[in-house]
Image (spheres, helix red, strand yellow):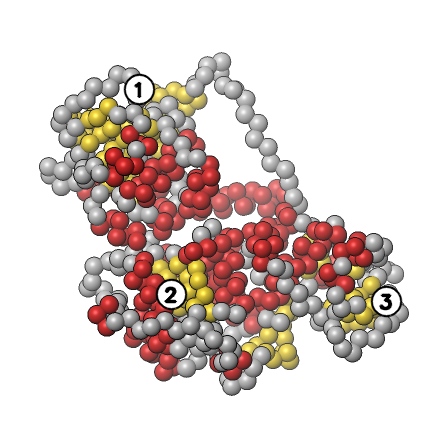
Amino acid sequence: EQLNKQRRALMFYLDLSMRLQRTLVLPRARLLRRAPPGSVGVQTSGAKYVRWGEIFNLTHLRRLHPVVELESFLDSLAPGQQIDALVELGQHGCVPTGAVRVELNGVRRVPVAETLCAPGLQHDLHTLGGMPQRVLAFSGVTDQLPQARAITLRPNVHFVQATYQAASQFVESTFGAAPFLAIHWRRTDFLLVRRSHPGVLQSASALTAHVRRVQSATGIRRVYLATDSDDQAELDQVERAIDPVRHSRTDSAASLLARAQLANVEIAICGMASRFLGTRTSSYTLAILEERSAIFGHATDTSEEMQVEPPPAPEAALIPSRDVSEAPPASPAVTVGRTGMFLVFDVSPLEQLNKQRRALMFYLDLSMRLQRTLVLPRARLLRRAPPGSVGVQTSGAKYVRWGEIFNLTHLRRLHPVVELESFLDSLAPGQQIDALVELGQHGCVPTGAVRVELNGVRRVPVAETLCAPGLQHDLHTLGGMPQRVLAFSGVTDQLPQARAITLRPNVHFVQATYQAASQFVESTFGAAPFLAIHWRRTDF
């Protein structure tokens, strides 16, 4: 089995070990070379074994359930200790034995008390739960966990951090904040083993038609292609048609580990994409689909497996290859940005940072519904009131750009945003905030043209102020307002949790925050699970 199927088997036995309340012993990952061109399958000779922790993040996994790597487990066995029962799952050639030494996961002469021939035992929880053996092993595994259960465990099965860093750096340097479509186009051995399966094989022209269909529906222009194709003619055809970006390939002489690491980086890149097209029946596509859903939080309708070849798009509708002299690609986010309609908000001066972020979620949702670019106020950092007092000190507040605390690249993949200072700097002479809606309940007086203080910035030009508490909830009225720049002041709104949780995967802290947290956890707890507590006191 190739690496992605080995990971799928891990999910099955992770689930089984959790149900049986047994520590899971992780076999080494077995890295295989593809068979030569024109052949099917893999070459088992020359397989390389690497510890699971060289590819996957065991710290995350151990927070869900105790695991130990096989080599460490075998090293920990005291003299006389052994695998108490080895269950052979293969259908043919199994012979029950007593005490014997076997080769297991490439490790020779592993001591086993007995071998059992019991295909299907891995599904018999009642029998397994009653087995007294301290160490129970399964060999010849091909099991995969049903998708509905696998997706609940998948958030705990991460690649090592270096994989995500490499993918993130590639996406940042290649696409910046622009959304992109990622494609997994499986060829080589599928040309032989899947040729009778309708919709699995996609020719270069069919792939192009699928891409143009998605581009037409979404406005996304940039394309990333992950493929094993070694047919230069069809690759040239795809290159001319859709101008995809590809990751630099590893040398054919590169180590199996380097090749596996690159394959995982490409899974992560496809996981980050705004939209994804995959190959049916491919375990690599399945890995990407899981990564998109469980790790990156994409909605299921942002991904699809290519089906029967779509009808060719009419020539007039074809989207040309990228040209550096053209205007930026018309993605959904860019399309909203080009409308020139903006939504500005400023949170009430008394709100702490977390409530400011909650207000961001509300106005992010509102700007998406109104198809307006969201203008982000600066974050207002406040000091707590002295001991014995309640609230915060508004005097001496410090303002910082939102991007100093939160990751705007992630946010911009969902919806166009601009920081307030940059927005104000972009206003041409005579341009202004067309309407400032005061949401406070008291003290509001409607005015005509005036200059106001907004988010700590003085003398911001405003054409008119409106006193309209509740207007932020009236989508019908807001949708009909013609003002180019619409602002809200005195904001305390929070989005209902059910909606907020769908947007939250796009509202990240800056990467340095996660790095600092990860380093602290690693140095303090290592792989041990820990309980975290937030105990609020002082003004409470």
Q: Residue at x 37, y 23 (%)?
A: 350
Secondary element at image label 2:
strand
Secondary element at image label 3:
loop
Residue 15 placed where, x, y %?
67, 54
Give, as a three-letter code, the residue at label 2.
Answer: Tyr
Give, as a three-letter code, the residue at label 1.
Answer: Gln
Question: Is label 1 in contact with label 2 (beta carbons under 8 Å)?
Answer: no
Residue 95 placed where, x, y %?
83, 75
Residue lying farthest bottom? 38
Q: Residue at x 18, y 37 (%)?
A: 483
Going from N to C along the chain, the mark reached first, 1 or 2, is: 2
- Mark nearest the camera among 1 and 2 is 1
Residue at which label 3 appears: 114
Going from N to C along the chain, the mark reached first, 3 or 2, is: 3
90 over 367 or under it: above or below: below
Give the Cα separation between the discs numbered 3 and 1. Answer: 78 Å
Question: Is label 3 in contact with label 1 (beta carbons under 8 Å)?
Answer: no
Dot 3: within a 10 Å radius of its alpha carbon, few (fewer than 14), some, or many (20 or more) residues? some
Residue 17 placed where, x, y %?
71, 54
Residue lying farthest top? 388
Q: Residue at x 79, y 68 (%)?
A: 118
Numbered badge on residue 224? 2
Q: Is residue 444 left or right of residue 290?
A: left
